[in-house]
Image (cartoon, helix red, strand yellow):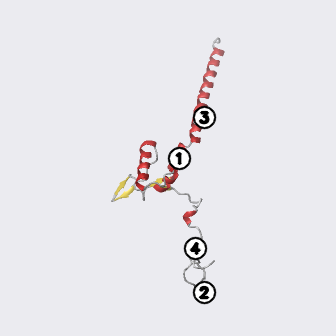
Amino acid sequence: MTNVYPFPRAGEEASADPLACIDARPSVRAFPNPARPEITYGLFTIARFLGVDRRGEAWKRDYVQALIDQEGFPAPLPLLVRGELSKDIHPRRSQWPALAVRAWFLAQSPCHAVARVEDAAMLDAAADAANRLDQAAEELFRGQP
C-alpha cells in the first residue's frame, strides 16, 4: 500500500507525485453495504427518488408535505425539537422509515396497478364461476326431494 499521508514516513522519501497523498479509494457511502441496508431515508434521498432533487430545500419540504397530506405518503419519524416531539418536516434532520417509503413507491408503480386490476378481474371471474355453479346445482337438484 502506498503512503496516503502528505508527509513521508520514517525511512521513506517524499513522493514526486503531488496527488500521492490523496486516497483514491471510494468512500464508504459511495457503495452501500447490502448486508446493512438503510433503515431510514432523509428528505434529500426521497427527493432524488421523486426526481425533484434539483429543487430548493423549502420546495422539497412543501412537496413531500403535500404528498403526506394528499397521497398517503408516510410521515417522517418524530424528532425532538426544543424538548418536544415534532412531526413536522425538518429538511436536514427528518427521517422516514425505508420500508414504508418503498411500499408507497411500489403502490404507485404501474406494475402494481396492473396487478390490482388483474386481481380484481380474477376475483370477478371467480365470483361469476361460483354463481354459475350454484345455478347449475339448483337446476340439477330442483326436481329431487
Mark 3 or mark 1, earlier in chain? 1
Mark 4 vs mark 3, CA separation in Å: 53 Å
Compared to residue 106, the image places residue 53 above or below, namely below
Which amino acid, mark 4?
Asp
Instruction: Residue at 56%, 75% (x, y): give it.
Output: 22
Instruction: Residue at 60%, 82% (x, y): give it.
Output: 16
Mark 3 or mark 2, earlier in chain? 2
Mark 2 or mark 1, earlier in chain? 2
Q: Which residue is mark 2?
A: 13
Q: Which residue is mark 4?
A: 23
For the residues labelled 1 and 4, say whether their Cβ atoms are less than 8 Å apart: no
Give the quarter of the image for residue 90: bottom left
Q: Nearer the viewer, residue 28 or 86?
A: 28
Compared to residue 113, the image places residue 22 above or below, namely below
Q: Which residue is mark 1?
A: 105
Q: Which residue is mark 3?
A: 118
State the image coordinates of residue 74 (x, y, percent, origin top left).
Answer: 46, 48
Instruction: Residue at 61%, 28% (x, y): give it.
Output: 125
Mark 1 vs mark 4, CA separation in Å: 37 Å
Disc number lying in front (1 or 4):
4
Disc number lying in front (3 or 2):
2
Q: Secondary structure at mark 2?
A: loop
**Quarter of the image that includes the C terminus:** top right
Which amino acid, mark 2?
Glu
